[in-house]
């Protein structure tokens, strides 16, 4: 059945065809957006030349306290703009293409009259100047990527020496399994967070939708680590396409802190071995948290910048965001 209603909803059937024809990044794929959003909550805008789609802006739109907000869906690393660059053109023509495409897409996204927009763009989007000219803001963030994971010997050699020792030790003391069910994974993650007095930030419904969609396409798996007594220590849900595997959700028991690095190193190493003939690279799904960044660096991963693009259209919403930030700081919450 074709999507109907607003123009960006009507674009979805054409976008599904585009995703089948082109290798768009995983988290911008139509099937992924279907899983993480309700059908009414995501859309796509087109830039076309000669009736051919040469650029898209993929977004998640929802209402929050009567405000129209465009933000990242849960468990989705990036979205935003993807451009189908013309091949073999001079640099000034490439810049001209970027400018025209972005101007057209910006006009459409602002036609939706959002009160606030904040999206992480894929790392291949590296020229946001046209967005700057239109009043958007940019904040650089970082992920970490292991390249060419098919060469596991080289990957192992680039791991921090002490972590290589931990990996050898973990192989002797721990056991890897791929038989943890998605419901068990969710319950385990929820419990590990509750043990740390934290709340899980995504629903079981969303997680199961993502898992089922990825598993059905043979693009998702759950790996877990247990001790010799059979106690579940950690688990990882990872997804992939032909280019990149993603470290999507990691859960670690509150009671394995003494060897938590051992379990994480072992789990990721086995995930890489699982993926080495399925994809090319492994993305740790970066974090700006110092400890997480150091762990990724010690695994030999390469730092990769990407942009967070944002714009505030409503002064009222901006005030509420500011007030929320102040309250979170004074209450000790993040």
Image (tube, rainbow, N blue to C red):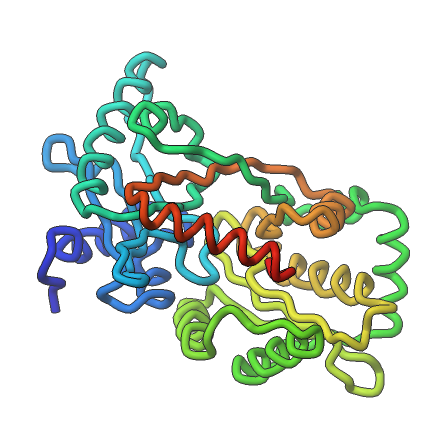
Image quarter of the C terminus? bottom right
Expressed as whole percent of the image width and height from the top left, the position of residue 227 reads 82, 80
Q: Is residue 206 above or below residue 327?
A: below
Is residue 155 visible in this depiction of the protein? Answer: no
Q: State the image coordinates of residue 138 (x, y, percent, origin top left).
A: 45, 33
Q: In the visual, does 151 lie left or right of 14?
A: right
Residue, x 51% and y 52% (percent of image)?
325
Q: 16 above or below 202? A: above
Which residue shows up at 41% across the image and 38% down it? 309
Q: Place residue 148 in its image quadrant.
A: top right
Q: Is residue 232 above or below residue 77?
A: below
Pick the front one: 273 or 257: 257
Horizontal side of 326 relative to 209 (left or right) equals: right
Query: Is residue 92 shown left or right of residue 293?
Result: left
Question: Is 88 or 208 nearer to us in this picture?
Answer: 208
Q: How many marks?
A: 0
């Amino acid at each position: 059945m074709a999507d109907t209603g607003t123009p960006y909803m009507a674009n979805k059937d054409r976008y599904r065809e585009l995703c089948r024809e082109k290798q768009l990044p995983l988290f911008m794929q139509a099937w992924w957006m279907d899983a993480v959003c309700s059908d009414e909550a995501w859309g796509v805008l087109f830039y076309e030349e000669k009736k051919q789609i040469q650029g898209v802006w993929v977004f998640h739109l929802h209402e929050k306290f009567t405000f129209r907000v465009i933000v990242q869906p849960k468990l989705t690393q990036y979205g935003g703009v993807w451009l189908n660059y013309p091949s073999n053109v001079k640099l000034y023509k490439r810049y001209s293409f970027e400018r025209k495409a972005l101007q057209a897409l910006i006009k459409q996204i602002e036609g939706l009259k959002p009160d606030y927009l904040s999206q992480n763009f894929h790392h291949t989007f590296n020229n946001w100047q046209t967005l700057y000219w239109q009043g958007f803001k940019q904040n650089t963030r970082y992920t970490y990527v292991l390249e060419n994971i098919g060469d596991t010997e080289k990957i192992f050699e680039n791991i921090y020496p002490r972590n290589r020792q931990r990996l050898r030790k973990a192989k002797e003391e721990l056991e890897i399994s791929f038989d943890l069910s998605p419901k068990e994974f969710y319950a385990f993650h929820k419990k590990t967070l509750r043990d740390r007095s934290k709340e899980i930030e995504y629903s079981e419904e969303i997680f199961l939708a993502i898992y089922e969609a990825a598993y059905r396409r043979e693009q998702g798996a759950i790996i877990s680590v247990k001790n010799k007594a059979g106690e579940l220590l950690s688990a990882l849900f990872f997804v992939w396409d032909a280019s990149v595997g993603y470290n999507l959700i990691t859960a670690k028991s509150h009671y394995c802190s003494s060897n938590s690095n051992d379990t994480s190193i072992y789990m990721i190493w086995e995930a890489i071995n699982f993926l080495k003939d399925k994809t090319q690279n492994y993305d740790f799904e970066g974090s700006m948290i110092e400890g997480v960044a150091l762990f990724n660096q010690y695994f030999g991963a390469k730092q990769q910048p990407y942009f967070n693009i944002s714009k505030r259209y409503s002064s009222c919403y901006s005030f509420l965001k500011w007030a929320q930030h102040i309250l979170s700081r004074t209450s000790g919450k993040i």
